Amino acid sequence: MALPNALSIDSLIDPSFILRAQKLLDSLPYSRWQATSITAGALVLYQVSKLLKMWWIDPYFSPLKDLPGPETYESIIWGNFKKILSTQNSVVHEEWFEKYGHVIHYRTFLLSRRLATKDPRALAHILNHAYDYPKPPQIREGLQKLFGHGLLFAEGDDHRRQRKIMNPSFGPAQVRNLLPVFYDKANELKEIWLRQIEDNGSDGIEVDAHVALTQVTLDVVGLAGFGYDFNCLVDGEKNELVRAFLELFTPPKGLPLLDLMANWFPILGRIPTENSKRTAHSRSVMHRVGRKLLDERRAAILAEATGGANAVDKKSVSGKDIFSVMIKANLAHDIKDSERMTDQEVIDQIITIVIAGHETTGTYLDWLLYELSRPENQHIQSKLREELLSVSSDRPTMEELNALPYLDAVIRENLRKNSVVDGTIRCAEKDDIIPLATPFVDRNGVERNEIRIKAGEQVFINIAALNRDKEIWGDDALEFKYVVSAAPDRRQTE
């Protein structure tokens, strides 16, 4: 008796399939328990062989093994990974680049080999072939369990389809429409701080800028992103959606070995852990609130369109928040059904918007205030204040903001020195040859003009190390130094 060619969850729970499976077991020269034991043993053997291949065979035959890099590793499970996580930012990578050169490799989870390079031509090749170098499937699946299948974690055709729908949400006109939200919340925070200073009199006051900036950015993202007022500046963490987001973003204590292993061996994901329980609860809250927001917003959009769904045109999409614009674009009659996002994908974009705009913006502002407050940067703070005070309005237009070259330079310099995201990991979709601008000498003393990488092997693009690379920025690359002169088209060092 033949089994179906392709198995799915629906086919496995279909009564007729279960009946055929029982008949097949009855026809075997073994009891059902014996057949089950054989099947279970085969599955265990398969997983063990898969583990051994990943752990020992693949690293031994990897073309990356001859690349320069650390000779030893701290753990047969974690490789050099624990050392990387035990230091701040990209310190370890920068030390390795300094010691071994601009092309290196090191060991990661289960001793797999990972490439890292700061060669500009190699990085351009990888980033210009983004669909040939997606996020590693294990990392992508782990992130999707946490944050869903939004744009940040989609790859290939799914990414193209979602990006096409979301593009109208981030056009210049849409950003301009969101300026009032930014100004309202910024002024609200300013008034809170001024009241705290006034209440303390001449004694002064110490404020926790990090907490306040986290709250205000979450408020801004909620209103600008999907028209939802968290009201964090006033209510703190009382809102259930706020608590769900913060719970989801809370890092686990220590390295969650079981959760990491589940990304390679999915069956382990069935074992409940504190992290998985917390994630499930947060996702449940976000899905419930997201579903309500989607239903309300879609009904309002269709009610406004006199001709129903057929009157929604992608070319004339506009709205007060990113989520509304995205829903309109997804409802537009002039796109194919195959190009539309599912309801779950639309809901998952709420988390995408929060990830893209909340923690990143809050952390960026933390670093900016820190840099401007340092004694050696007081002249930068003074010059920036002077330029800002030259603007007559406390709600400048986009054109007025774009006419502030010093502000632009300070913002860019903070992005350079204090990159919010230290790096990103990519995985070769197929065997590839990566070209180099500068050759390197491998462990065998052979000069190489290219890097050979095997399908499935990972590349770490270290943004922080590149932004502070002395070969690019000079010996004082760790200083907050690049500002603009009076001429907007020329940059100079203060």
Image (cartoon, rainbow, N blue to C red):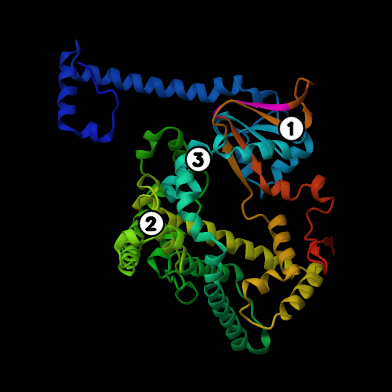
Residue 340, which numbered label? none
Give 313 or 378, whichever is nearer the viewer. 313
User: Tag 3: residue type?
Assistant: Ile
Q: Magenta includes 284? A: no
Residue 436, which numbered label? 1
Q: CA distance from mark 3 to mark 2?
A: 33 Å
Q: Which residue is mark 3?
A: 139
Q: Is residue 295 above or below residue 68?
A: below
Residue 332, which numbered label? 2
Closer to viewer: mark 3 or mark 2: 2
User: Tag 2: residue type?
Assistant: Ala
Q: CA distance from mark 1 to mark 3?
A: 27 Å
Proximity of marks 1 and 3: CB atoms separated by less than 8 Å: no
Closer to viewer: mark 1 or mark 2: 2
User: Tag 1: residue type?
Assistant: Leu
Identify the magenta region.
450-456
Q: Magenta includes 455? A: yes
